[in-house]
Image (cartoon, rainbow, N blue to C red):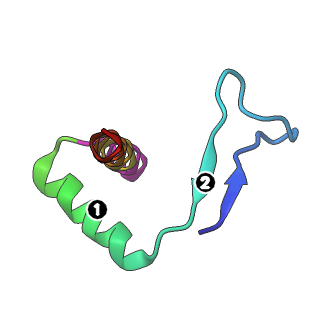
Amino acid sequence: MHTTEVKLKWGKNMPGANYKSVSINDELIERIKQLIDQLGTYHSVAEFVSEAVRLRIELLEKQQKTTEK
């Protein structure tokens, strides 16, 4: 997975936030776009991916806490 910092034209990081970009294969992007069109819940691929990643992290952290007990 390739990440890069999002920079404005003059080369500084976006103010107030640290963002990274991630490469995702075209097939997954198309599937996400189809879901966005069908559901109408998300406004962008980025919004969908951010929520999907957040939910996955929460699940893994919950599972990790359960196995540590």
Q: Nearer the viewer, residue 13 or 60?
A: 60
Query: Where's the C terminus, which quadrant?
Result: top left
Q: Is residue 29 left or right of residue 10?
A: left
Label 1 element class: helix
Identify the amino acid type marked 1.
Ile
> Which quadrant of the view contains residue 68?
top left
Give the residue at mark 1.
32
Label 2 element class: strand
Check residue 16 for magenta coloring. no
Give the residue at mark 2.
21
Alpha carbon distance from label 1 to label 2: 16 Å
> Which quadrant of the view contains residue 50?
top left
Q: Nearer the viewer, residue 40 or 22?
A: 22
Q: Is residue 23 left or right of residue 61?
A: right
Magenta residue span: 42-52
Identify the amino acid type marked 2.
Ser
x and y percent of residue 16 in the render?
Answer: 67, 21
Q: Residue at x 35, y 78 (%)?
A: 27
Q: Residue furthest top?
A: 16
Q: Residue at x 34, y 49 (%)?
A: 60
Q: Is residue 6 left or right of residue 39?
A: right
Q: Is residue 18 left or right of residue 53?
A: right
Check residue 49 for magenta coloring. yes
Label 1 vs 2, first from the N-terminus = 2
Q: Residue at x 81, y 42 (%)?
A: 9
Label 2 environment density (alpha carbons within 10 Å; few <14, some 14–19, many ≥20): few
